[in-house]
Image (cartoon, helix red, strand yellow):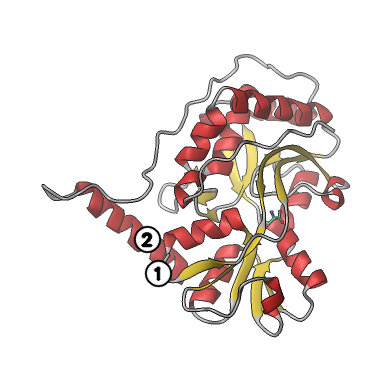
Amino acid sequence: MTVVKRALAALAALAVLAACGKPGTPPPKGPQPGALPGYQVRTGAPVNGSPTLDAARGRGHLVVGAKEDQPYLGQKNPATGTYSGFDIEIARMVAASLGFGPDRIEFRTIASANRETALQNGQVDYYVGTYTINDNRKKLVGFAGPYFIAGQSLLVRRSNDSIHGPQDLAGRKVCSAAGSTPYQRIEKDYPKARLVGYDTYSACVDNLVTGQVDAVTTDNAILQGYAAKAPDEMKIAGEPFSKEPYGIGTPRNDTVLRLALDDALAAHEQNGDWKKAYDATLGLSGVPAPTPPPIDRY
Ligand code: GLU
């Protein structure tokens, strides 16, 4: 087991102990998991003319790409195989609008560097996993949304008091996921940093805890999750230094699917599902729900 996985397992065990409680013990402090919303599943085939959805209906279920190691966003329980987090709830709420209940979604973990290929090859019907919308990616895939705006940040060991922003990275080892926008930004704008690329951010966090790297860089939403799970070991340094609008990745030519996902996001933002889902997931890492950004129906 990796250091981070061990820490998370230990925390989970503690949470179970705490939940049992002793008589007279005060309730545990900090945000508590709220109830996840249930989403109204539309019946029949509510969206027509999407080749992706036609194929999914033929197969009987949707295949949705996601992350499995990003606390509060996209996390897979290794014992049950169940996925949870804000991105997973986004995937479930829009699936309900397309006529697929939660039992008709198969989640598949796809790393940052493999998202475009997975969508291009039809390995997944759509992708929800801290996926920044940008013009380069739009040449290869489509994006519904945005449904959230994050910003690139830095995670350092709690004892570190010399890194306060990307300008302090010169000569330091900084880790990010290959193929991600944060990786590309450090490579281009901060060439003096000693950049290390892994498949996942959890691998980077392991290397931070063991002292192999000095910082991990990616979106604040992701880093806040790791910091919230192990606040004695890690902290966020400085302020966000980019804008990362999260979209739902789609196969590029399936405009019907993309616009149906835009409609679905708008409906769930309006009926309160979005906020309830946020409060029950990402909100637990300590940041109150923002107003969702305007959807860009291009
Ligand atoms: N949002 C950034 C990206 O899409 C970083 C997070 C990630 O790699 O999923 O590249």
Q: Residue 140: horizontal and vertical position, in percent?
A: 85, 47
Q: Classify residue 193 by image quadrant.
A: bottom right
Q: Residue 292: horizontal and vertical position, in percent?
A: 64, 36
- According to the picture, the residue beneath numbered tag 1 turns out to be 232
Query: Farthest residue toward the top?
Result: 44
At mark 2, the secondary structure is helix
Please state which amino acid type lies under the numbered disc 2: Ala
Q: Residue at x 50, y 53 (%)?
A: 71
Q: Residue at x 73, y 50 (%)?
A: 132
- Which quadrant: the C terminus? top right
Q: CA distance from mark 2 to mark 1?
A: 16 Å
Q: Earlier in the sequence, mark 2 or mark 1?
A: 2
Q: Residue at x 58, y 39 (%)?
A: 106
Q: Residue 260: horizontal and vertical position, in percent?
A: 73, 25
- Asked whether 270 or 290 is in front, the reply is 290
**Number of marks in the image?**
2
At mark 1, the secondary structure is loop
Q: Residue 150: horizontal and vertical position, in percent?
A: 65, 51
Taking the image as shown, residue 40 lies to the left or right of residue 36, namely right
Above or below: residue 63 compared with residue 175: above
Q: Residues within 10 Å of mark 2 (few under 14, many from 20)?
A: few
- Asked whether 78 or 163 is in front, the reply is 163
> Can the viewer see residue 53 in this picture?
no
